[in-house]
Amino acid sequence: MLPLRSSSSYRSAVTSLPALGVRLLFASAAILIATGCASPGPPRPPSLNLPQPATDLTAERIGDQVILHWTTPTKTTDKLPLKGNFTARICRDAVAATTPATPTTLASTKPSTPPCTSVLRVAAHTGQDTATDTLPSSLTADPSSLLSYRVEIENAAGHTAGPSSEAFVAAGSAPPPVTSLRATAVPTGARLEWQPHVATSASSPTFIELRRLSPELAARQTASKSKSSQSPQLAKQESAEVHLRAGSGPSPAPGDGAPATQSQPETAPEPAGTIDQTAHLGETYRYTAQRVRIVHLKSRTLEIRSVPSSFISIALRDTFPPAVPTELAAILGEPSTGPTRSSSIDLSWQPNSEPDLAGYLVYRRTLSNTSTPASRLTATPLSGPSFRDLTAVPGQRYAYTVTAVDTSGNESAPSTPIEETLPQP
């Protein structure tokens, strides 16, 4: 039989049980805190999903249109990936000839951004984007004026983080397109010709820009691209697209205080053609041309380009013979030693300078028989400008000529003949 506890001891044990549970609860909480279950902190606000503004807007005036290019960002102003559909709002504003002074205060010294005059909306895509603004007739007639473009990227709710940086073009009449463009092969490259534009005294200076494409060269470069790391020569290949220029360049920009309207009239007529000396014989090229007008507005030199001409193609085949050898001379060779006496007729001439020269051919004709054509003495082209005729018959008078041959097999006309007779022994 168990001993009976006193009532005071029993009450003390019972009252101590809740206190023990409280201590165990606090001990468990301390262990959880020590093991890393910290508070997540204040909640973050939801993203507004505002695209970052574009920073690389460019504008080019071609005919009655303005071509815009920019890069649509891939992140929001919160540095989060863009989600949903976006729209590019194109803004076009006329730049005033003079900017009126506006008072500023200490509280606000930063000029305000002018409102966006929207003229176009297009779907935007992350990465490289473009848009085309067709100008109204009021902006395609002279006098020229300055236009400013900006682009704003809007989210699906129509909200934006602000406009891009400005890009400028000139309003005014565009130059007429280049017509009657044609190309012919010449020994120094490709001769390009077109119908020249007769400018009026009030016209701005113009020049012709030619764009040359080489489809065959582009195909060869694509085929050999995998070998470029192994061959240093491939790293220095000719570009498959080349821009050339013909005619007078931009006139000097007006100085401070000069009228910001039309530039000085051109001082030389537009050329009717040019030679592309960078074109190589044996290649096939495609050419297109634009007439470019230069205007100066508010200390800016701007271009107004015509619509590009149609492409023309030309295969530059080498059908051009080398120059005729000159200064052909003949002398009697030294008598040879031996049981039989013989000598030669030695020829020399000035060397040709063509880079594709393959050599020279020598011809001989007997003067005693004028009906006999000249015979060729060299089976293959000579590498140097000299020849020794060891087959000449003593007492016979000969007429010698020399021609030059290139690597394409084109042969020049014969040189001026030289006559010589090998004396009798």
Image: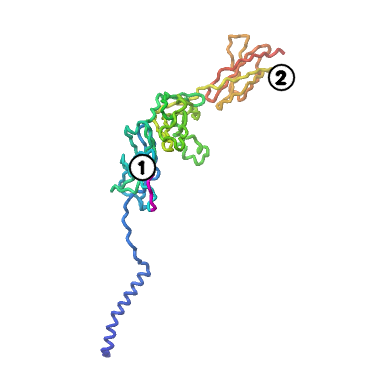
| Residue drawn at point x = 50 percent, y = 39 percent | 235
Q: Which residue is mark 2?
A: 334
Could you tell me residue 199's position as x and y percent?
A: 41, 25
Residue 424 visible in the current orientation: yes
**Left or right: 145 with respect to 275?**
left
Q: Which residues are magenta?
A: 99-106
- Discs 1/2, front: 1
Could you tell me residue 170's position as x and y percent?
A: 39, 35
Could you tell me residue 260's position as x and y percent?
A: 41, 35
Q: Is residue 391 above or below residue 100?
A: above
Q: Is residue 244 above or below residue 381?
A: below
Mark 1 → mark 2, Cα distance in angstroms: 86 Å
Q: Which residue is mark 1?
A: 150
Magenta portion: prevailing SS class: loop
Q: Looking at the rendering, in which quadrant would you find the N terminus?
A: bottom left
Tell which of 68 and 32 is nearer to you. 68
Q: Amino acid at mark 1?
A: Arg
Q: Is residue 343 above or below residue 26?
A: above
Tell which of 322 and 231 is nearer to you. 322
Tell which of 349 and 186 is nearer to you. 186
Q: Is residue 25 above or below residue 62?
A: below
Q: Quadrant of residue 208?
A: top left
Q: Quadrant of residue 119?
A: top left
Q: Secondary structure at mark 2?
A: loop
Its colouring scheme is rainbow
Q: Amino acid at mark 2?
A: Glu
